[in-house]
Image (tube, helix red, strand yellow):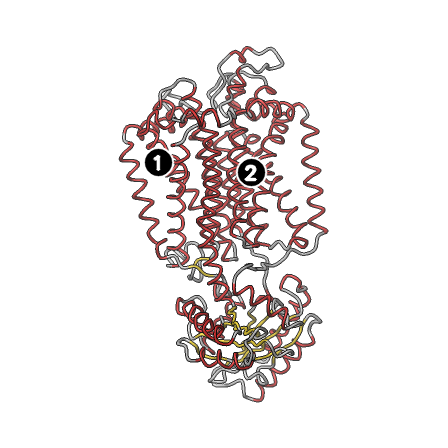
Amino acid sequence: MATFLYKLGRLAFRRRRFVALIWVALLAVAGVGAATAASPAADSFSVPGTEAQRAFDLLDQRFPGGNADGATARVVFQAPKGETMKDPANKAAVERTVRALQSGSGQVDRVADPYAAKTLSKDARTAYAQVTYKVTGFELTDASKDALKDAAKDGRKDGLTVEVGGNALQAIPETGATEVIGIAVSAVVLVITFGALIAAGLPLLTALIGVGIGVSTITALSSALDLSKTTSTLAMMIGLAVGIDYALFIVSRYRTELTEGREREEAAGRAVGTAGSAVVFAGLTVVIALVGLAVVNIPMLTKMGLAAAGTVAIAVLIALTLIPALLGFAGKRVLPRKARASEGADEQGTTNAAGRPNMGTRWARFVLRRPVVVLLAVVLGLGAVAIPAASLELGLPDDGAQPTHTTQRKAYDLLSDGFGPGFNGPLMLVVDGRDAHQGQSARSAAGQVAKKVKALDDVAVLTPPTFNKAGDTATLTVVPKSKPSSAATEDLVHDIRSTTAHIATDTGARTLVTGTTAMNVDVSQKLNDALVPYLALVVGLAFLLLMVVFRSVLVPLKAALGFLLSVVAALGAVVAVFQWGWLADVFGVEQTGPIMSMMPIFLVGVVFGLAMDYEVFLVTRMREAFVHGERPGEAVVTGFRHGARVVTAAAVIMISVFAGFIGSSDSMIKMIGFGLAVAVFFDAFLVRMALVPAVLALLGRAAWWLPRWLQRILPNVDVEGEGLREQPTGEPDPSTSRAPAHV
């Protein structure tokens, strides 16, 4: 591995103009594709194999033209205090708005007049018009959305409060200024780390090129592959973080090679051959974790994982090829002025001006003196932070999670106040009587369902059955008494399914429950069922990969257990902020509630891959030192002396990039950005920087133990760069006779 990457690095350095041209051309092609592609999709959501999804599919079959997945909007009207919606002037204003909605767009299927549909609250002060479209949310044109907004504005001119809810007004999430601040913080950290503007600019430049190619490709394919806007946002989030980090490690190693006296091409080759090996394996763990999300079998989650994995793969390729090419253009200007003036300067800062050990060395020695104390402090501290995770409640975001200033949230609150909290999350029952027993019919089965369900607790309203043309399928709408995200509404879903199962046994007519809340219940169950197989797959593959890298059994095991500790602590922090409301104002959380159903498994997947990055970068240094004859304790100190500064900078950069997305207007993006930033903080600074050296100190030589039969089976990938000892440099250079520098 090291020898191949060494040759690749030298080739890219020599053919730097050609390599740079290729990447610029790829960026241009992807950009043209994105600019000419159809508009990206909104967040379409389907969960194959669940009852709620089967109900939607059945509605499409039995009610053709019904547009079960068509976009919807609820235009909510509220009369001024002291008036009602039955007042002639208010009624006339509503009817004008309804006519404007009907004629505003050719994509409108139908508009339910509040007076004809009797959708007035008990006090007659609130009413709503249901707008159904012929197309899905991502196919809705801007003209149709503008017509909807204009109709609402006309209603407001007549003195009414008019707000619009539903998925027809879904917008691209806005990340705000904090994303730019995150990138700015990354730039400052790079400048401080390298002390040279060119060296600091290379990781940023290459990361932006990689993200530009990845996100542009996603945008170009979004319409064809039904990729959501969230997919590209998350790909950008992860791509920026790993792109900067991977380039940081290559550039840092190149500078070390230069200051040890090697020629520029040789330094580039050795940087890619040593640090590049760690980049490859770190990238592989991230890709495995992201691609493994396909195990859950939720299309949206699978696409998010694959898109992010593709962006990570691009970041790895750029680090191995474009970075050495750009280093060829930069020359020795990647070094600080003092280092350029004095050959052999200690670029990594292993000692300070007074000759004292650097911070990484001092910290490692401190941990080695008190491993038990450090181990207990980290475990107990993260365990305390993880306590809120025991109260985790899962849910799907709806308009109730929108910021309070949006019209969707205002419409949600008006409906809740006027009609009851459960009105924002109605359940739909689909009674399939096509296979009913002889002597039974869909009508009789639907009647039994209506009678039994109406008698259940927490049912506020039950509409009469509506049948299709064939008369073999009926739909009923159930409005719970509780709000959509409450445990009582979830219990109602289970009660309805249990009750209708007995009716299906007696009549042969099955009843399916769907709707937002029912979909949430099914998604949560599906994710819970998939979590163990997913962890087994991802952790198992990564364990094998790390066993190949470190040629050890206990080091990969320690890495996996440390990751579990950090990710559970991160979930606890997410629950404390987004569910309990702790520090909600600080992080701009306007509405607390259940945690997004996909959050735990997505956090597990992404954080596992990123956590293994720091494990690989830090522990390969220790492994290298141990292989070269140092005692276990000395190897730990050596690893921190050479790697702690760069790993710390990489972690700060990744945290700042993720934290930048906390400013997003989309609750899901905000939650994921916070969760990833906190998880990386816990894993990088507490687990990798404290727990890892403490455990290795306690294990001693046993940490690097590998059974002989495994030694024979596992391939030797030479991450330590042993093969580079005999590698000819291609030019006279006295430094080639030295022992290879450590990674």
- In this image, 248 relative to 569: left or right? right
Residue at 49% from the left image edge and 34% from the top image edge:
545
- Residue 483 visible somewhere in the drawing: no
Residue at mark 1 to residue at mark 2: CA–CA distance: 26 Å
Work out which residue is located at the far front of the displayed protein and give it. Answer: 438
Q: In the figure, residue 291 lies in which quadrant? A: top right
Query: Dot 2: what SS?
Result: helix
> Dot 1: few (<14), some (14–19), or many (≥20) neighbours within 10 Å?
many
Q: Which residue is mark 1?
A: 691
Label 2 amino acid? Answer: Gly
SS of the residue at dot 1?
Answer: helix
Residue 446: image x %, image y %? Answer: 52, 79
Mark with earlier residue (1, 2): 2
Instruction: Look at label 1 and name its amino acid.
Output: Leu
Residue lying furthest bottom:
88
Residues 698 and 49: in front is 49
Determine whether 600 is above or below 14 in the image: below
Q: Which residue is mark 2?
A: 243
Displayed quadrant of residue 14: top right
